[in-house]
Amino acid sequence: MSPLTHDGLLRRAKDLDLPAQHHIDGVDEPGGGTAFAVVSPRDGQVLAEVANARTAEVDLAVAAARRAFDAGPWPRLAPADRGRILMRIAELLEEQREKIALTISLEMGKPITDAHDIELRAAINTFRWYGQLADKLTDESPHTTPDALALITREPAGVVGAVVPWNFPLTLASWKLAPALAAGCTVVLKPSENSPLSALLLSRLATEAGLPPGVLNVVTGDGPVAGRALGMHPDVDVLAFTGSTGVGRHFLRYAADSNLKRVWLELGGKSPNIILPDAPDLEKAAATAAWGIFFNQGEMCTAPSRLLVHSSVAERVTEVIVARAGELRVGDPLDPATEMGALVGESHLKRVLDHISTGLEEGARLRAGGGRALADTGGSFLRPTVFDRVNPGMRLAREEIFGPVLSILTFDDLDEAVQLANATEYGLAAGLWTADLSTAHKVSRALRAGTVWVNCYEEGDLTVPFGGMKQSGNGRDKSAHAIEKYTELKTTWIQL
């Protein structure tokens, strides 16, 4: 990021030219519905009045995607040519990195440094990685009898509906879009109504990069109307969703009630982070636990919101986390020095505060935070919050809070730790801190989670898949495995 000061970023924010229309068939489309306000959580001010999709706009976008798939060049391009356009999207994202990071920071409250250095890096790398992968995918020809030739080919699945949340608006959109486009699919993307602006900017860059009309369409609107219309649409072949488990259930119903489209879900989490007394660096384990729950204001499906720590070291670990909570700089997302920004909006802040109140009523002990911060700004800020003396039956330990609220539970032996870790309806991610290699392998295998981090948290790259078990969803984002969601296997048997 250029060395802009807080004042410089504030000036740039005032001059931003923010998009307000759908992007359908390669052009901006105002639509016929009423607009909705995008409100910045940093100060409660309206950023833009954005087109609110009705069923008619969703139908228009799906029709454009269907034409582009059935008769357009995109599925028929050489994979290397598709890859070059994806890599051009990455280049344009890099060129516009500061503007898009500023937009994300404004629309969902993420600190500008995180938006620029983490969110945009992930989006750029994702388009680049799948652009490079596009012509590396291979089909199969298994050995059969001498008088036959068998071919197993992967073909693009068709029109993809992608619905993504607000917490990582561009990263999670990229995780859906890049592999779907690399496979030769066309896409209709519906971003969250809380964070539609960055997705609209991306759609315009994609058209500029050379995507043919109709290949990527973005419609903005709410879930009950636009999301439902996309989920129910008979011309959508695949639906990819990241968000809450409750909304994921709706998309499964929509598929059942329409054309039985394939539905891929990346849903909620209540991730356990286990610290054993033989952790190679107890201070690092505690500091990482604090970073993990407070990063992105705790608004992460993988947030290590349940810290399971051996009773012999529990107080030592807790003291480190409480100290870090007190030191953390909560402030204006547009200040490069801010470490934790605003929650996405006032309604979400109230929901998190309700969880905190319930935790106190149920008998958990508040060790840090617990209330609003910077209330005079008009923004949705919360102090980093830590509870200990949490038991597994409490709401704090069972429900996804999606905020900077840590629940500390203790255990006395390894079997109890694994039992506590798996005592959840979710299965997205988990952490484990131990110096014993055998323990690391055994516990990792025992944990019912799609990703297990050992002596780290939130590490990895695009070579590894991401997704969950149980009610955290199905299918995988990232890696070559993501291509599987957007392709169909075809068998051709040729009698010689």
Image (cartoon, helix red, strand yellow):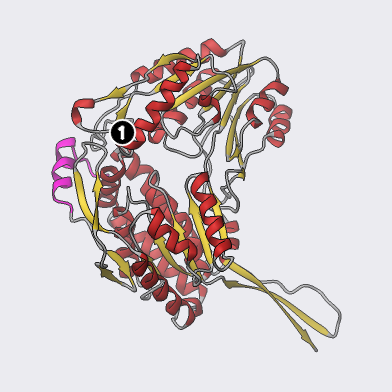
User: Where in the figure is residue 305, as x and y percent of width and height?
Assistant: 50, 29
Q: As drawn, which residue projects farthest toward the bottom?
A: 496
Observer-nearest of 273 and 51: 51
Say if the magenta span includes residue 334: no
Which residue is depicted at the point 60% across and 62% down?
A: 484
Quadrant where the C terminus lies?
Answer: bottom right
Query: Which quadrant of the figure has residue 385?
Result: top left
Image quadrant occupied by the N terminus: top left
User: Compared with residue 327, is residue 462 higher up or lower down, i.e. above or below?
Assistant: below
In this orientation, does residue 462 appear?
no
Q: Residue at x 52, y 50 (%)?
A: 248
Does 288 sit above or below residue 242?
Answer: above
Splitting the image into 4 quarters, where does residue 423 fall?
A: top right
Q: Which residue is mark 1?
A: 341
Q: Which residues are magenta?
A: 1-16
Percent x, y of residue 37: 23, 50
For numbered disc 1, what is the local secondary structure? loop
Residue type at mark 1 is: Gly
Residue 328, image x, y percentages: 34, 23
**Image position, residue 176 (x, y; %):** 48, 58
Lateral position of residue 417 relative to residue 232, left or right:
right
Between 217 and 346, which is closer to the camera in this rendering? 346
